[in-house]
Image (tube, rainbow, N blue to C red):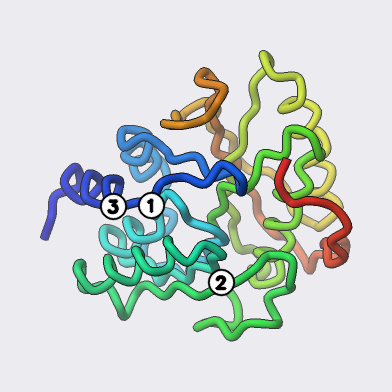
């Protein structure tokens, strides 16, 4: 067994270089540890869906908290690296990663579970498209989330960036339209290595699904990123 600090260091150093073209920004290790401290018990022994996982948080949840993680990922580098970590950490029974493009709905892929207890996304921030990518990410996860299941979303809310405030208002509306409620917010707790806005942090937003979602996005008519 690795201790928590060592396992975070191992995972953080193994991550592929971030691809700015698809809005990958790697969380700093101390923020990854803070994330585990604040959220880990919510994921313990749960069936969890991750859509995109360049930070490799799913690996940490599975290894430390026994989470049954399913990762849907577009980037072949991340798929390869997480499969290597599965073997190295002996978590193949807990952790699965599958190739997936979010422009398609989740009925196009066979996941280990029909529905999930919880999901985790750190989606595109969409500074110029009103969080369209994040809404698509959320749509895909709500397709698989059970009623009364929880969702965990990482997004910026920063008054120094007016787009982040406008985006959050749009996002809150989208959450409510899909029969979900925001149940908790933990603001400005994540820091990143390579974001062009060095002072931009991100926030934990928890939602709960109260009933079936009716206004999910299926028709992709614009760029998912920015």
Among numbered discs 2 and 3, the one appearing first in the sequence: 3
Position of 10 with respect to 132 (left or right) is left
Does residue 118 show up?
A: no
Tag 1, which secondary structure?
Answer: loop
- Residue 149 falls in image quadrant: bottom right
The residue furthest top is 160
Disc 2 versus disc 1: nearer the observer: 1
Label annotation for residue 16: 1
Near-viewer residue (143 or 92): 92
The residue lying at 31 percent from left, 37 percent from top is 29
Compute the Cα span from label 1 to label 3: 7 Å
Whichever of labels 2 and 1 marks the residue nearer the N terminus, that label is: 1
Circle 3 Cα neighbour tier, 10 Å, few/some/many (<14 / 14–19 / ≥20): some
According to the image, label 2 marks what residue? 116
The residues bearing labels 2 and 1 have C-alpha atoms spaced at a distance of: 27 Å
Local SS, label 3? helix
Instruction: Look at the numbered disc 2 and give the secondary structure of its residue.
Output: strand
102 over 169 or under it: above or below? below
Query: Which residue corresponds to the image point at 79% horizontal and 34% vertical from the top-left?
Result: 128
Residue drawn at point x = 27 percent, y = 46 percent: 13
Number of other residues with Cα within 10 Å of mark 1, as a class: few under 14, some 14 to 19, many 20 or more: some
Crowdedness near tag 2: few (<14), some (14–19) or many (≥20) residues, C-alpha within 10 Å? many
Q: Name the residue under label 3.
A: 14
Q: Residue 78, percent across and down?
A: 43, 61
Q: In this view, does 97 lie above or below 202?
A: below
Q: Nearer the viewer, mark 2 or mark 3?
A: 3
Q: Is residue 5 left or right of residue 181?
A: left
Which percent across, then down, holds residue 173? 84, 43
């Amino acid at each position: 067994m690795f201790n928590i600090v060592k396992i975070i260091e191992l995972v953080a150093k193994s991550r592929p270089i971030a691809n700015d073209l698809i809005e990958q920004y790697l969380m700093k290790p101390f923020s990854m540890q803070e994330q585990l401290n604040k959220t880990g018990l919510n994921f313990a022994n749960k069936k969890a869906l991750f859509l995109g996982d360049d930070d490799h948080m799913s690996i940490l949840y599975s290894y430390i908290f026994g989470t049954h993680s399913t990762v849907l990922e577009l980037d072949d580098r991340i798929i390869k690296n997480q499969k290597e970590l599965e073997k190295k950490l002996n978590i193949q029974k807990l952790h699965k990663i599958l190739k997936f493009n979010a422009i398609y709905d989740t009925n196009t892929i066979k996941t280990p579970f029909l529905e999930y207890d919880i999901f985790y996304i750190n989606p595109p921030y969409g500074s110029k498209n009103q969080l369209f990518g994040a809404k698509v990410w959320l749509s895909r996860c709500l397709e698989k989330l059970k009623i009364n299941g929880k969702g965990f979303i990482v997004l910026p809310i920063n008054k120094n960036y007016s787009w982040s405030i406008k985006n959050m208002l749009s996002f809150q509306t989208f959450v409510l339209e899909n029969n979900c409620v925001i149940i908790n917010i933990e603001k400005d707790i994540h820091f990143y290595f390579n974001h062009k806005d060095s002072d931009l942090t991100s926030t934990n937003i928890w939602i709960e699904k109260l009933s079936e979602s009716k206004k999910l996005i299926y028709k992709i008519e614009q760029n998912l990123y920015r």
